Structures are given as C-alpha cells and as structure tokens.
Amino acid sequence: MSILRVEDVVSGYGSMEVLHGVSLGVEEGQIVSLLGPNGSGKTTLLRTVFGILSPWKGKIYFKGEDISGIAAERIARIGMGYVPQEENIFPSLTVQENLEMGAFIREDDWQPRLEEVYELFPDLTDRRKSRAGELSGGMRQMLAIGRALMLNPELLLLDEPSTGLAPRLVDAIFERIVKLKEQGVTVFLVEQNAQALQIPDKAYILEGGEKKAEGGAQELLEDAEIGRLYLGR
Amino acid sequence: MAELVVYGIVLGSIIALGSVGLTLIWGITDLFNCAHGDQITVGAYIALPFVSLFSWIGFLQAKVGPFSFNWGLALAFIPAILLSIGLAVLIDRWVYKPLRQSGAHFITSFIASIGVAWGLRGLIYIIWGADFRFYTKGLRPMLFLPLEIKLRLDEIFIVVVAWAAVATVYLFLSKAKMGKALRALADNRGLARVAGINTERMIVWAWGIAAALIAIAGILYGIETQLRPEMGWIFLLPLFAAIILGGKGSITGALAGGLVLGIAQQVSTAWLLPTYKPAVAFIIMILVLLFRPKGIFGRRQM
C-alpha cells in the first residue's frame, strides 16, 4: 500500500505556480527518491506534502487519509517527519536540547528513543552539550535527521541531506538512511545528486514542476537519455 | 564617579528587566514592541489601588525591614504581575495575533504597537491624571558607603529583586521544557512548527514572562522615583538600545545591554545635563547599528 499518495498537486508561492499537477506515490517500507535540477519544484513538493504550503489543486493522502491543506503542526503529530534542506537545526541550543525539542510534543517517555538516535549517530553522543550551531555540516545533517526521528515517524521526508557535503560524508548519510529503512521507516528522499540513485527502491524525476520519469532506481540509472537530460552525465 | 556607576547599576537593573522581555518577544514574534515602556507604566500604576487597599489591613502597614515602603506594597507585586500578564495576553490576542495571522509586515505591527503605547498612556491620564504619585511618603533611609557613595536602602532592594527575577527567568529558559521551546522558537520558528510545537501557545508564554518582568520593573522604578504617566515611555529608547546591543533574541545580551545602558546614562551626567540621558542611549544605539548591527552578543550569521 502507498503510505503517501500525491494526486495532481498544483502548488506554489504567492501567485507563482511551481508545481503544475504532480502525481506520485511512496510505498511503505521503501526508500523513494525524487530527483531533479535546481528550481524543479522538489522542495515545493515536500513543503506542500508537509502542510507548510497548501495545495492549490489536487489531493495528498497519508496512510489513506486525506491530509491536503492540514497544517504542519498537526502533520508532525500523525507520523510524518520532515527535515528541511537549510536551517534545519536550532543553532543556539545544544545537541541534546535539539533532540529534546524534536520530542517536545511527546507525552510518553522518550528517553529510550533518545538513546536509539544516539546509537544511530554515535558522533552526536560526544557532542551532546555542544551548541548545534558549532557543528560541522555533516554532523548538522545528522542532528537534523535525529531531531525528526524523535517523534518515531513512519514516513520521513528528507530534503537534499547531501547538500554541501564531501562525498565521504554523503555516503555516511546514505548509509544511515538505508539503516532507517531496515528499521522500518519509509523514506522520501529529495536529491539533486545522482549518487542518490544508489539507494532507493524507486525514483521519480521532476523538472519544471512536472514529473518527467519514474521507475526503479537501477532502470533510471541505466537509461542513457534520462542520464543525459536530467542527471548531467 | 564610583557613585554614578552604582546609580547606573540600579538603573541598569530596571532596564534589564524590561529588555529581557522585549528581546524575547522580538525574537519570537518579530514584534519590536513600542508599548513595552508604557506597559511598564501600567505595571507601576496598577499596583497603586492595591497599595491603598492593603493599607486598610493593619499589619500590612508596617514597613518592610529598613526600607521606605510597607508590606502592602510588597504584597501588591502579586496582583500587579497577574494583571500585567492578563493585559499583555489580551493585547496580543486583539492586536498582534490578527496581524501575525494575516501575514502583516513587521513594520505594521511595529506601528500598531505605537498605537497601543499611546492608548495605554491615555488610559493612565484618564484614570490617575497627570500628577505625580508616590507609593509611600516619608523618609527614605540612606546608606553611606566608602568612596563617598550615598545609596538609598531601597536601591539595594531594587537591585536584589530585579536580579532575582531575571535569574528566575534565565533558569526557566535554560532548564524548563517550555523555556527551551521558547529559545527554540526564537532560534528557528519554521523548524519549531515542523517539530509540531504550537507556536501560538508559546507566544502566550513569552508574553506572560515579559509582562511579569514589566510589572516588576514598573513597581521598582516607582519605588526609585515616583509614578508619572511618562515614566515608562522614556525607558523605550534605552530598552531598544539595550536589546540591539545584545542582539536579537539574546537573553544574556539583553541583560548586559541593560546594564551598559544604565551605567552609560548615569555616568554621562558627570559631563552632561541629565536631560541628555536619552541622547546617550540614542548615540549608543546608532553606534551599534553602524558597527555591530547584529549586536555585541548576537548570533553569528548561519
């Protein structure tokens, strides 16, 4: 079953239409990638799914329920997590406080979850008391993902977690994403980097606010024309 | 000179009470609240009827220790703080919240707050008139310290209460769950929402804290000088200078900024007429804006 279904979504900012009717689905338990060049509307799509933007037209279903136009504050409570591309940490709070804020709306005991997140990102453990703003780029991304994991999301939306990172760190991040999948988290990964085609089960290609291709990751990687047109090779 | 520095610390402690709340509201809602000064005035005046009321109760007429005021005034802090919080929350609900939700530019809410400031001052003129008022009449015991420092005992009370209040707020912000969430909100409002934090509820908390400090500042300044309708308004410039010096949303910055402004203003009277005190605040503000626009303690650009 699709955990997330996007149907003919039109969305944008102010009077500028960015997405011109996009449909896609994310299967439960998979990693699904959305690839495309800068300005293709990838971030707009994530923001619309998470309720930061309202779709102008079309519907969004999460676990079979219509969530189109529901505010982000509420979507965070029903099992979806979102890690924005930039400004995705609280810089003046410590690492530990960032994770605590991730769990702010939880009323049960989240200590075990905190330990699990530290286990997934052991580097963060030694920096518990450091201010998040002092972390390096890679650590910052890990903290940002860790924050979102504190609510035990079933579906995690990741916006270009590899931005500005050295290839070695990109691999480290992707490795953790695969680990998340093994733990049962569904991941919807937005990327510009064709390196991101190594890990997903399925991928979509977006350009100019329209879906241009979809298929298995391997399939897309091997398609010469798609490689030339959208992945810059 | 030493004496002026001590007076500066007294004044700076009162400014710091105002600036902590002001920077909190600025960091969390983007509102540069021009009514903050007049809310201080309201806090001072609101205590007046309770001081009269409590003076009917015999044992409250006794002076508090060696200070010039009685237990009635000490007790009046509580209703004044509560009313100040209620007023601030209502103003936010009726004025700033609708503006926030319509996505108004921060200049719009800035100008709306000027309206609130004049409205509050008008109310004070209507209810209490333009005459000066005092919480208590009579002698104010003095303390003679080395270095020819003459200090009123009340001023020690002012400094102690101000810093106790500020320390409480500081502890709350660094240790309590709600306090951390307020700092998170000042840091990155968008992400706070993504984490499911109800921002409107947090804004009510922020106003509560700011308004409690406002009432304390008002009463303490009323003890230090006298109550007059313009007493808070003239604080606005040093308050703004203090939080700009401290950097947006920085609590420690606002504290340090408040102290610096208090001391600078008082020490300037060694060479300048006291009427130039606001000009000193203004010059500091302009210098900071020119050379350190993010404030001395401001966060580095990400």
Image (spheres, coloured by chain):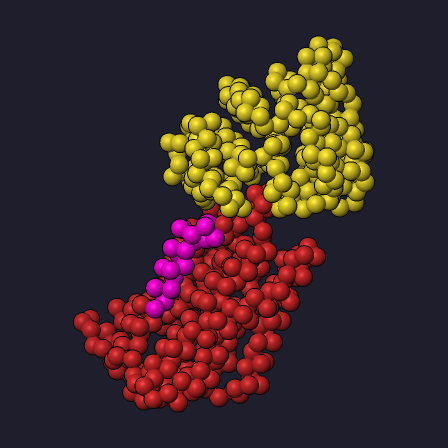
Chain colours: A yellow, B red
Q: Is residue A207 above or below residue B196?
A: above
Name the spot of residue A203 as percent of width and height, x first. Answer: 70, 21
Residue at 39% over, 74% down = B220
The answer to whether residue B56 is seen in the rendering is: yes
Q: Report the quarter where the N terminus of chain B lies.
A: bottom left
Q: Is residue B188 left or right of residue B156?
A: right
Task: State the predominant SS element of the stretch in magenta.
Answer: helix
Residue at 60% over, 71% down = B116
**Residue closer to the observer: A145 or B296:** A145
Q: Is residue A110 left or right of residue A178?
A: left
Q: Is residue A81 above or below residue B14?
A: above
Question: Which residue appears farthest toward the left when viewing the image?
Answer: B146
* Residue B167 is covered by the magenta coloring: yes
The answer to whether residue A90 is seen in the rendering is: no
Name the spot of residue B142 as percent of width and height, x first. Answer: 25, 80
* Residue A92 is covered by the magenta coloring: no
**Residue closer to the observer: B145 or B83:** B83
Place residue B261 in its image quadrant.
bottom left
Name the spot of residue B269 as percent of width and height, x first. Answer: 36, 72
What residue range appears in magenta? B161-180
